[in-house]
Amino acid sequence: MRLPGVRPALIVAHPGHELRLHGWLEIARPIVLVLTDGSGASGRSRLRSTAGVLTATDAAPGPLFGRLTDRALYAMIVARDAALALRLVDELAAAILGHRVDYVVADALEGYNPAHDLCHVLVSAAVLQARRSGVRVPQLDFPLAAAPNASPSRRGSARLDLDEAALARKLAAARAYVGLGNEVERALALYGTEAFRVERLRRLGEPPCTVPPEDPPFYERYGASQVADGQYADVLRYREHFAPLAAAVWRSAVDEEPWAASAS
Ligand SMILES: [Zn+2]
């Protein structure tokens, strides 16, 4: 059942993230917006798998559902393509306002995957943009790299403990999901099934943080090792690529008047 009058939105970088909040999906029935199609290096979209999860949980796909390939999102960050990023912010803000969303849940900024971190920044900017239209929407996040039951350090966070039946449905949905390869089994082996009984939605501070917990973040160190092995030509770097793009998005989101910078 959906809480009366409450319309949440889940906004994630990749199809499959929704599995982490399967119990909450069943209860809250959010609209779900997904930035990429999850095609990764394989080139095969995971959107059908996620559409199946949403149908089974009575959640609904939102107006933006797999807009970019993973390669296009990666290229947008490397090219610091603020114009494209800001179009996505506009679309997210329009969805928040148009669907009269009451609260937004999005990927956490963990320094693990640049697409997750960018999703976090774009959603934060869209929430600020909605506020400029007079609509205040709380933003919460959930971890994808950290343990699902890791303790939150923020006030206003929510915790859901799934009962046996809900946990069983969640594990069955994750194992039946086509396109995640061995990621599901790896996560279950790493944390144990019991960890996935807990779902945490963590309230963001104000203003929301746009800086990863480590500099350089994990993805940059991992990328550098891949390049050293000769597997990739270039590394996506936080200071060179991500931070300038995030700053450009942020400047646009927090400026009261977009033309103020050129007026001085
Ligand atoms: Zn992901």
Image (cartoon, rainbow, N blue to C red):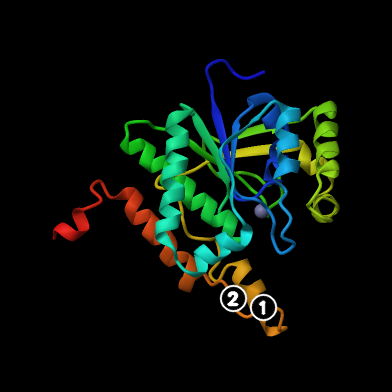
In percent of width and height, residue 77 lies at 51, 64
In percent of width and height, residue 37 lies at 65, 51
Q: Nearer the viewer, residue 98 or 26?
A: 98
Q: Nearer the viewer, residue 103 or 231?
A: 231
The local crowd at label 1, few if under 14, some if 14 to 19, many if 20 or more residues have their Cα within 10 Å, is: few
Residue indicated by mark 2: 235
Q: Amino acid at mark 1?
A: Tyr
At a point 84% along the width and 56% down the height, the residue shown is 182
Decide if residue 199 is on the left or right side of residue 3: right
At a point 21% along the width and 53% down the height, the residue shown is 259
Decide if residue 108 is on the left or right side of residue 222: left
At a point 67% along the width and 18% down the height, the residue shown is 1
Q: Quadrant of the C terminus?
A: bottom left
Q: Is residue 122 above or below residue 96?
A: below
**Residue 250: which quarter of the image?**
bottom left
Q: Is residue 70 above or below residue 141?
A: below
Q: Is residue 20 above or below residue 87?
A: above
Q: Nearer the viewer, residue 116 or 232?
A: 232
**Residue 214: which quarter of the image?**
bottom right
Contact, mark 1 vs mark 2 (Cβ under 8 Å): yes
In percent of width and height, residue 212 lies at 53, 61
Q: Amino acid at mark 2?
A: Val
> Which callout, 1 or 2, points to the residue nearer the camera?
1
The local crowd at label 2, few if under 14, some if 14 to 19, many if 20 or more residues have their Cα within 10 Å, is: some
Q: CA distance from mark 1 to mark 2?
A: 8 Å
Residue indicated by mark 1: 232
